[in-house]
């Protein structure tokens, strides 16, 4: 099993002897200017209070008990099963997990929430799995969704049959625990719900919550569009299959989490990086109404391209390179390709944290995404629930190589040439390397701002304009972890995940374990507690920090550092410039 890029970042950054800042792919042109071309549509919204009440979960044991196969008389979906410790009925059949040794936590891994999206189900919306009547073991992790192992497309890992969830709970049976549903990152092309970094056991135990991690289709398998695929769809749309997978998983949570000690009216969706992009999309999607009651957007832009632009940049070139473009039956051709070869076709979307171009991901399709999320937020045409949104201070620190002054100037000029010479002069003046430790630090600040920090302000403003439900903003600046001499500390992309999940054991440092210091443990308690409190009551305040309600004019935020504090205005001059240059 491969680890996600976030786990690799954390491991190499904390390593004592290795971990040089080696070269990354050169940053491409910014895509932030592309978000304006959209279609508009109205959508159903949730209650104005923001406390969306999810549909009452069905007690699967009672439902299944009334059903049987009319031919054989055999019970369907595990009729008659009741919760018994690690044995729990679900809407598709009974499962058996395990109690983790040394704790009270029950763990369920590899729980099917959809049919395998293979064969004729490839490049189609997810369908329910077939019911099973015997107890199904769910102790081992399912494979990651098929994906590349590196940017060179040298090999693949995972399986096309990958639509499973993982769940951790302090107790099975009836309960009222908040439910935290996590969408992993990886540029919507790599990553896995079973990465050890995302193990929910420590979070479930420390906060008394139910934790769920969700798999979804990646790359072309998750987000490819084509008119012939739309023509065979009942919604007349194609792509966004990954988003539909996430919606299907959320329905599973709604219908089943009551049997796992969770409260289906206290479901919080949170995602990081591409997972945050996906959380934005679901916040704006009418299909997600009633499926979650709070959301957290960690280091991800709320930015869906128009179908025309997405086709021009991603799907069109991909279809041409696939060899299927001139076939009479394009969908049949695409379904005949081996999945391991399909994910290698360029553009493959392999992510670069510092790169400014967009790969595969959610796009405006008129069905899952009627309008870009920012537009939906501002108009109040979204799922209005309590939201936390934020970014890390030095998101791209691990993805930017050392730069000379000449290289820095050339990179800025080539990357932002589309904005014109006057804009480049403004950018170079505001991000003058003389004001930073070196040219690399200046480019880290620039790319962190344009890709993450300023996008967080933009989304917070849109949300605050469009709902009365509370909105909170954070700025994660903690760098108090123990770092080796070759790795100056920084609040880099994905670092906050180690503190939310509390999985220091997931950090591999070449034969020895990372030992958290006192500030590490305090940060973990602060973040885990805040995330759980938002899920439970819509307010993350506690643990010595009162989170200010977001206001557009003052830009208040919670500074997540040691010690934590509250402030107003994050990178204000820089974000004002980017809003001006990018037309927001």
Image: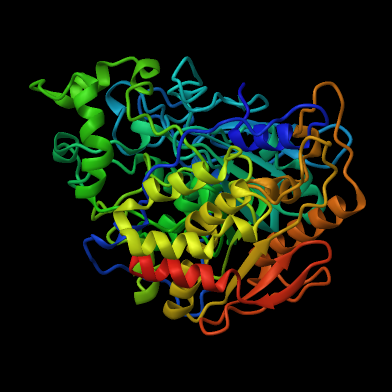
Q: Residue at x 69, y 77 (%)?
A: 567
Total marks placed: 0
The chosen color scheme is rainbow
The answer to whether residue 6 shows anywhere in this view is: yes
- Pick the residue in front: 336 or 465: 465
Q: Give the percent coordinates (x, y) of residue 312.
A: 21, 42
Q: Quadrant of residue 348?
A: top left
Q: Residue furthest left?
A: 328
Query: Which of 288 and 560 lies nearest the eye of the viewer?
Result: 560
Q: Is residue 222 left or right of residue 494?
A: left
207 lies above or below 49: above
568 horizontally vs 546: left or right: left
User: What quarter of the picture does the N terminus occupy?
Assistant: top right
Q: Is residue 289 above or below residue 3?
A: below
Towards the viewer: 53 or 305: 305
Q: Residue at x 75, y 76 (%)?
A: 546
Work out whether 548 lies above or below 52.
below
Q: Looking at the image, is 434 positioned above or below residue 14?
A: below
Residue 134, quarter of picture = top right
Q: Which x, y percent locates residue 474?
A: 64, 66
Q: Is residue 176 left or right of residue 272?
A: right
Give me the residue at 19% from left, 36% from top: 226
Q: Residue furthest right?
A: 518
Q: Nearer the viewer, residue 459 or 173?
A: 459
User: Percent position (x, y) of residue 198?
Assistant: 67, 40
Q: In the displayed image of the protein, which residue is found farthest to the bottom?
A: 553
Asked whether residue 170 appears in the rendered view, the answer is no
Q: Quadrant of residue 124?
A: top left
Residue 449, image x, y percentages: 53, 59
């Amino acid at each position: 099993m491969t680890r996600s890029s976030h786990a690799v970042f954390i491991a190499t950054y904390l390593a004592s002897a290795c971990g040089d800042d080696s070269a990354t792919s050169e940053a491409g042109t910014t895509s932030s200017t592309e978000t304006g071309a959209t279609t508009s549509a109205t959508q159903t919204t949730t209650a104005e209070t923001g406390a969306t009440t999810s549909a009452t979960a069905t007690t699967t044991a009672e439902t299944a008990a009334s059903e049987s196969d009319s031919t054989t008389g055999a019970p369907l979906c595990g009729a008659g099963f009741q919760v018994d410790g690690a044995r729990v009925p679900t809407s598709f059949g009974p499962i058996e997990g395990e109690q983790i040794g040394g704790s009270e936590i029950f763990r369920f891994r590899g729980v099917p929430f959809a049919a395998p999206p293979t064969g004729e189900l490839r490049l189609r919306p997810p369908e329910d799995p077939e019911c099973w009547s015997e107890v199904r073991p769910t102790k081992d992790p399912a494979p990651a969704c098929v994906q590349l192992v590196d940017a060179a497309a040298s090999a693949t890992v995972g399986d096309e049959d990958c639509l499973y969830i993982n769940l951790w709970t302090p107790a099975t049976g009836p309960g009222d625990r908040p439910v935290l549903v996590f969408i992993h990152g990886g540029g919507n092309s790599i990553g896995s719900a079973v990465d050890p970094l995302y193990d929910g056991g420590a979070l479930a135990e420390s906060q008394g919550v139910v934790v769920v991690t969700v798999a979804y289709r990646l790359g072309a398998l998750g987000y490819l569009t084509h008119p012939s695929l739309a023509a065979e769809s009942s919604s007349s749309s194609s792509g966004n299959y990954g988003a539909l997978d996430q919606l299907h998983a959320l329905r599973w949570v709604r219908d089943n989490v009551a049997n796992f000690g969770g409260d289906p009216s206290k479901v919080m969706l949170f995602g990081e990086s591409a997972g945050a992009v996906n959380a934005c999309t679901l916040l704006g999607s009418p299909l997600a109404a009633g499926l979650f009651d709070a959301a957290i957007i960690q280091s991800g832009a709320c930015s869906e391209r128009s179908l025309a632009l997405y086709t021009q940049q991603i799907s069109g070139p991909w279809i041409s390179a696939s060899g299927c473009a001139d076939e009479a039956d394009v969908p049949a051709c695409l379904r005949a390709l081996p999945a391991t070869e399909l994910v290698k076709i360029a553009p493959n979307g392999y992510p670069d944290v510092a790169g400014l171009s967009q790969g595969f991901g959610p796009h405006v399709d008129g069905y899952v995404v009627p309008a870009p999320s920012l537009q939906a937020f501002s108009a109040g045409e979204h799922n209005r629930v309590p939201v936390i949104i934020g970014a890390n201070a030095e998101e791209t620190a691990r993805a930017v190589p050392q730069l000379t002054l000449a290289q820095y100037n050339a990179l800025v000029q080539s990357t932002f040439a589309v904005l014109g010479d006057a804009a480049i002069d403004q950018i170079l003046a505001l991000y003058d390397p003389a004001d930073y430790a070196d040219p690399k630090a200046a480019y880290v600040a620039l790319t962190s701002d344009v890709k993450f920090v300023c996008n967080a302000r933009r989304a917070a403003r849109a949300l605050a304009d469009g709902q009365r439900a509370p909105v909170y903003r954070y700025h994660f600046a903690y760098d108090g972890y123990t770092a080796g001499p070759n790795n100056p500390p920084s609040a880099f992309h994905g670092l906050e995940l180690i503190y939310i999940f509390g999985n220091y054991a997931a950090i591999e440092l070449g034969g020895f374990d990372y030992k958290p210091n006192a500030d590490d443990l305090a940060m973990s308690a602060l973040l885990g507690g805040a995330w759980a409190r938002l899920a439970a009551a819509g307010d993350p305040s506690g643990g010595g920090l009162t989170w200010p309600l977001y206001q557009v004019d003052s830009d208040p935020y919670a500074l997540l550092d040691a010690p934590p504090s509250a402030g107003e205005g994050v990178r204000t001059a820089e974000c004002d410039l980017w809003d001006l240059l990018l037309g927001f």
